[in-house]
Image (cartoon, rainbow, N blue to C red):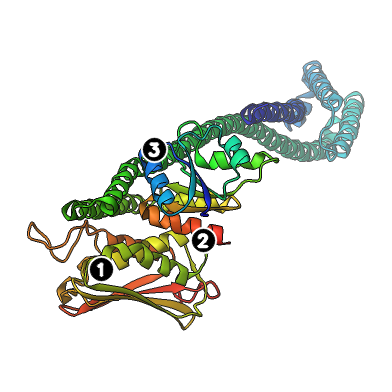
Amino acid sequence: MGPSVLLVDDNIDILSQAEAYLVNRGCRVLATASPIGVGAMVLRHRPDVAVVDVMMPGLDGGTLVDVLDAQQALERPHVIFYSAIDEEQLHQLTRSRVRTSYVSKVDGLPALFAAISRQVAR
Amino acid sequence: MSPRRLVLGGAVLLLAGLTAAVGLVTHEINDRAAAALAEQRVHVERLSQIERLARATHSDMVERWLLPWADRPRREQALEERVSAVRQAARDFAALPVVDPAEAPLTAQLMVQVALWSNRVDQASVSADGPSATPELRAHLDGMAHRIGELIDVVSRAGSSTDRRLSVLRLQQTILQVAFVVTTLMILALALFWARARRVAEERAVAAEAARDLEQREARQRATFFAGLSHELRTPLVAIQGFASNLAERSAAEAARAAAARIAHESQELLSIINNILEAAKLDAGKVEVHLEPVDVAEVLHHCVQRCQGLVVGRPVELRCEIDGKLPAARADLVKLGHVFTNLVANAVKFTPSGSVTVRAHATGGAILIEVADTGVGIPPEALDRIWKPFVQVSTGPARQHNGTGLGLSISRGLLELMGGRIDVRSTEGEGSVFTVMLPTEARPEQLAS
């Protein structure tokens, strides 16, 4: 059985593409277009990895991770920021947060899948 | 209390103190001047009296004494008048206060001489031995005249001294008044100048802070704009790429798969162009910041090569890595270094129709040397300098064979220079090119600079 992945991205096209791509490669995917309620989903489904977009309306990816970290009952999974923003900004996001990494959307879904596989292998 | 009010208050206090001090000194000078003026009046009076005495004791007294005895009543009356005049003048003179101590003994001696002379005149008159007493009286008169002359000298000298003292005091008064007025004006001018200078400085500081705030706000807005623009341009392209890839994977028709692959490739090209334009704009505006840290160069290179593998799919080009396993950590910006090598490798692949692109890296003399070598079209010698300029490609115009903005090498050189590294190229037209990057190591960051 492949890794369980929580996908959070407000862009439905990219969300559905990522979901299809990862499911085709054996992942169990839980996808949501809204960052609201992600904490409850993590608590309920305990995903191996969370793939989180950065620029989302209402709650950006960085703040979402901070909110998850603030909930002590929650054992947050490793988060992979997956966004089309500058790599420099992605790097800064991960530099200040533990158990995070990033993949630029520019690198595509194969790079995302490789990063998920590396993370699960650890 | 504001500094301006403090300074103005200080200036007022200083002026008040100065005015009080000047008042005290002026009062003292006025007292001395009044005393000197009184002395001067006494001198004038004494001089006038002594001159009256001198006139009264003139030697014509002897001539009057020698008037014919026959006219004795007239002679005696004249003598009495003159002696009385001398006595009165002497008393008046002696009654005046002595200013110069040297006058006192001379005055006393003169009084004695006047008394002796007037007694002798009286005796001679009543004893009718007038003519015989004439030489003695003449001698008395000469003695008195001599003493009077001495007194005139002394009184005149003392008067001159007083005059000089008075002149000096008046000059001091004038100087003090002028100095007071000038100092007052200077203090007021300085206080006003200081207050104005301070106001100007405060206004400038406020203006500078406002300019700084504006600049920072503009920088933040620019950064936000670039971030937003980057995101908004890339996101739909990423979606297009994703759909194209899915289509290419799932489509049964060969033509559809080829078209989908073409869409994916072109959107990848477009993404690359957008990335370069945004990076070039930031470099041009001087807004690129590098975060130097220890970087595993081998990992960055492997990642870049992996990233570019898609570019050689379906082409007779081999993309490979030959990296020394014991590379030291470089001192660089992780993300920007990845950007540089992605540019170099993608460029090499683009200009290599067939053959190979090899990425090599090894440590050398305290630095890390990375080569991106291709067996592509190469660069003509006359174009080697031009390739570093933005928007320049070796082949230009509508007939050029390769797409692109010509920004990649310019950006790579700019980013490497910001990181303290450098880049060079050697190339043979028709045989290929080798781009060489030198990076300082974390252990010896000064190596390249030296």
Q: Which mark is residue B349?
A: 1
Label pair 1/2, CB-CB below 8 angstroms: no
Residue B34 at least partly seen: yes
User: CA separation, marks 1 and 2?
Assistant: 28 Å
Callouts 3 and 1 in the same chain: no
The three-letter amino acid code for the residue at tag 1 is Val
Q: Which residue corresponds to the image point at 47% horizontal and 61% vertical from the top-left?
A: B333
Chain of the residue on which disc 3 is drawn: A
Mark closer to the observer (1, 2): 2
| Residue identifier under label 3 | A11
> In the rendered image, which quarter contains the N terminus of chain B?
top right
Viewer-side residue, B51 vs B64: B51
Residue B65 sits above or below residue B252 on the image: above
Viewer-side residue, B238 vs B18: B238
The three-letter amino acid code for the residue at tag 2 is Arg
Which secondary structure, mark 3? loop
Dot 1, how many residues are within 10 Å of its Cα: few (below 14), some (14-19), or many (20+)? many
Q: Which mark is residue A118?
A: 2
Viewer-side residue, B94 vs B310: B310
Q: Which residue corresponds to the image point at 47% horizontal and 73% vertical from the top-left?
A: B440
Residue A84 at least partly seen: no
Q: Which residue corresponds to the image point at 55% horizontal and 29% vertical from the top-left?
A: B192
Instruction: Give the mark nearer the N terminus: 3 vs 2.
Output: 3
Which secondary structure, mark 1? helix
Q: Position of residue A50 (x, y in %)?
A: 53, 47
User: CA separation, marks 3 and 1?
Assistant: 32 Å
User: CA separation, marks 3 and 2?
Assistant: 25 Å
